[in-house]
Image: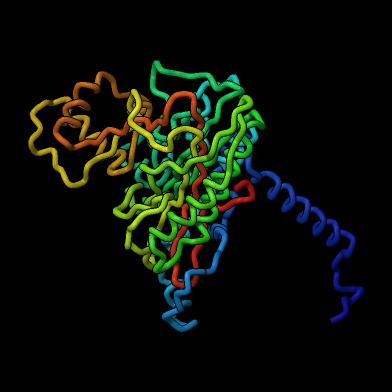
Amino acid sequence: MPLRPNSGIDIGKKKTRRRTKKKKKAAAAAAVRQTAPPRVLLSTLFPSGIYPPGEIGEYNNGNLSRTTGEELRYLDRMDDVFLNDYRQAAEVHRQVRQWTQQSVKPGQTLSEIAESIEDGVRALTGHQGLEPGDSLKAGMGFPTGLSLNNCAAHFTPSPGNDVVLQRHDVMKVDFGVHVNGRIVDSAFTMAFDPVYDNLLEAVKDATNTGVKAAGIDARMRDIGAAIQEVMESYEVEIQGKTFPVKAIRNITGHDIKRYRIHGDKQVPFVKNSMQTRMEEGEVFAIETFGSTGTGYVSDDVGIYGYGRNRDVSGAQLHLSSAKSLLKTIDQNFGTLVFCRRYLDRLGLQKYLLGMNNLVSNGIVEPYAPLSDVKGSYVAQFEHTILLRSTGKEIISRGDDY
């Protein structure tokens, strides 16, 4: 309908109001961009509450779809909450790690790096973890691993034991993010000297091979053999000496359960005779480690963190400090892995005697750093995948790796 001249509407003023409204929308959009370091609550960036999916991949192991398209869509609808929790955790991981890759430089302490990662995760999930139960809603899935050189995994800075990152270091950055116990486990390796480029490329290629081989009905033995073949086709030259890249044979990838980073299934990255298969609905961390050393790791000095044994109660405890500490652990971490820095952050003091008592009673399990021989270098890459009926979702995939 054409506008009547005597309708009383001022066309010029109407256009001005529209332009002003557009400018306000643009300003509002700019205002909710992520900061550096990342501190904007993720739900502010995604006001719809719907988070982006990971990379969707097809199964290539020959298994046939067992359901119709209509049934698949129905199953997906039933998984909405599960998927959205995982996708939220994955987006937090992507934003925090991409900032980490851009900002971390030699000369920083490992404590500074770990705390910046963990501060970012807590800010983006909106859970600082300072009140009982808050860390169980969302936040860190496990302590940030910052393992240098021959240390393959399970090192995090502890109070009074800080290390400065050097230009010649090879640093594995491994951290988890959870939302309602749905843990995204993803890792990458940082090196500042191009001499290590081939080592990093070997392990990244091997991890991507494992991701490609994984799927419903895929056998662990086939996945491990495929990973090892790719990994060990690489070599790296360091200081004029050539080293074959070896797949570490005594650590594995794993399935992930709710609030439990390590489930019951293992995903080796060497040839093996395991008949175990992956199954629909499972979640796996596909990770690989490549080394210039022996390809075998052993416990190193120190403690990375602790995990609550869900099958052992504290009924037998007599030491009051152990009882009090166990109550704090159950309220704040449950079966999520935690470290001393997290206890210090809660304001706990003089808890080591109680912790030793919990460990000796099998209620809490300690995790030591895992290292290859001194002088060697280890790299790691890792992704979390969801085995859905409609295809596998590499939930942690990003533009970076």
The location of residue 38, given as percent across then percent down, is 58, 38
The location of residue 239, given as percent across then percent down, is 62, 24
- Vertically, is 115 above or below 59? above
Q: Nearer the viewer, residue 390 or 125?
A: 390
The location of residue 36, given as percent across then percent down, is 63, 35
- Vertically, is 149 above or below 379? above
Which residue is at a point 48% across and 50% down the rendered structure image? 228
Total numbered badges shown on the rendered structure: 0
The location of residue 64, given as percent across then percent down, is 45, 78
Q: Nearer the viewer, residue 74 or 169?
A: 169
Name the image quarter holding residue 95.
top right
Which residue is at a point 64% across and 31% down the rendered structure image? 195
Q: Nearer the viewer, residue 44 or 136?
A: 136
Name the image quarter holding residue 350.
top left
Note whether residue 92 is visible.
Answer: no
**Horizontal side of residue 118 vs 282, given as left or right:** right
**Horizontal side of residue 330 vs 112, given as left or right:** left
Which residue is at a point 50% across and 57% down the rendered structure image? 211
Which residue is at a point 69% across and 50% down the rendered structure image? 29
Image quarter (top left, top right, bottom left or bottom right) of the N terminus: bottom right
Pick out the residue farthest to the front.
241
**Horizontal side of residue 238 vs 27, given as left or right:** left
- The colour scheme is rainbow
